Image: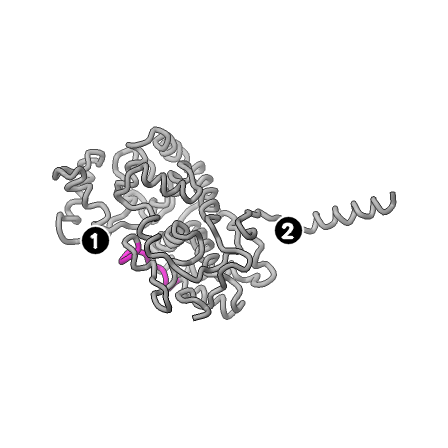
Amino acid sequence: MANSINFLLIITTLVAIAPLCFCHSTNGGYLYPQFYDRTCPQALNIVKSIVAKAVAKEPRMAASLLRLHFHDCFVKGCDASILLDSGGGITSEKNSIPNRNSVRGFDVIDEIKSALEKACPRTVSCADILAVVARDSTVLVSWWPSWVVPLGRRDSRDASLSGSNNNIPAPNNTFQTILTKFKLKGLNIVDLVALSGSHTIGNARCTSFRQRLYNQTGKGRPDSSLDRSYSAQLRTRCPQSGGDQNLFFLDFVSPTSFDNSYFKNLLSFKGLLSSDQVLVTKSQESLELVKRYAESEELFFDQFAKSMVKMGNVSPLTGRRGEIRTNCRKMSSS
């Protein structure tokens, strides 16, 4: 009896002192927020400080850093493959159609990695840096407090140009194509609509939506689901030819603030990209979600955080798979 009581006391004590763990099981290991608590306790503060400096210098950088995590996770999973430069047998994803002349923020990731290598050599993965940076950049331009990011990802030793070209949702994809791309990553329609809300910050190039202004149907007619006055305004800086790189706010109401105005814009048929507006015009289920998020900013933020964690769990490398790069742009072995 005494031995049983002692055993129970030991178990109770272990449970009491164990850290709270929001663990997420993956194929080959677990992701959990406390992953670096012992090996690099200053890691999150280092990341947060550098992100804050970058966003203060250029508010647009918040959207760019958030986008890096999206474009990474939709290709081979969240493994920092998007950060690899070409060379040593690698063909960089940076040259893909969705990324070329578009993705940015690599210098900020470089600065973070350099600081972390000085503090904790070969400890913090580039894949985890992308996940934390996505959270921190969002929080910096929002009133929403934060969310917990599970950690423990490792870095890939390769990239996939074809995967980047084919797996990342494109501005002119149909609703069903976009939903299929999400489902292939284990994400559902709720995740699709909530994560699309990231377009409440950032910019898009003229070339990404020109078709809507002049030839959406292939018969020389504009997209009928685009508000006429908004369309006319866009045409002043996005002509039928030329101006491909001209930038436009994805959310013209509050372009540097992470809020729910993006969803209100959709309901007014003022979504910039076709891939935005189809959330209202092509699916009753997604339309209802858009309405709910337009009505409640808190509801949107709550689901966005949940969907970000879910996306961050897409096929991460854990355990002994992959590596920890010392330079996010190239394999450590190269």
Label 2 crowd (10 A; few <14 / some 14-19 / many >=20): few
Q: Look at the image and say whether residue 32 sits in the magenta stretch.
A: no
Which residue is the site of mark 1? Answer: 246
Relative horizontal placement of residue 134, taking residue 215 as reference (left or right):
right
Between 125 and 200, the residue placed more toward the observer is: 125
Closer to the chain start, of discs 1 and 2, is: 2
Relative horizontal placement of residue 30, taking residue 136 as reference (left or right):
right
User: Measuring 14% from the left and 37% from the top, which residue is drawn there?
Assistant: 221
Instruction: Report the amino acid beneath label 1.
Output: Asn
User: Measuring 19% from the left and 34% from the top, which residue is drawn there?
Assistant: 224
Local SS, label 1? loop
Question: Where does the image place residue 175, in percent across and percent down from the top left?
Answer: 31, 37
Question: Where does the image place residue 220, in percent across and percent down from the top left?
Answer: 12, 39
User: Measuring 20% from the left and 39% from the top, which residue is drawn there?
Assistant: 230
Residue extending furthest right? 1
**Circles 1 and 2: CB atoms closer than 8 Å:** no
Which residue is the site of mark 2? Answer: 19
Instruction: Report the amino acid beneath label 2.
Output: Pro
Determine which of the numbered discs, if any, sits on residue 177 in the image: none
- Screen quadrant of the N terminus: top right
The magenta segment? 99-108
Q: Is the magenta stretch mostly helix, strand or loop?
A: loop
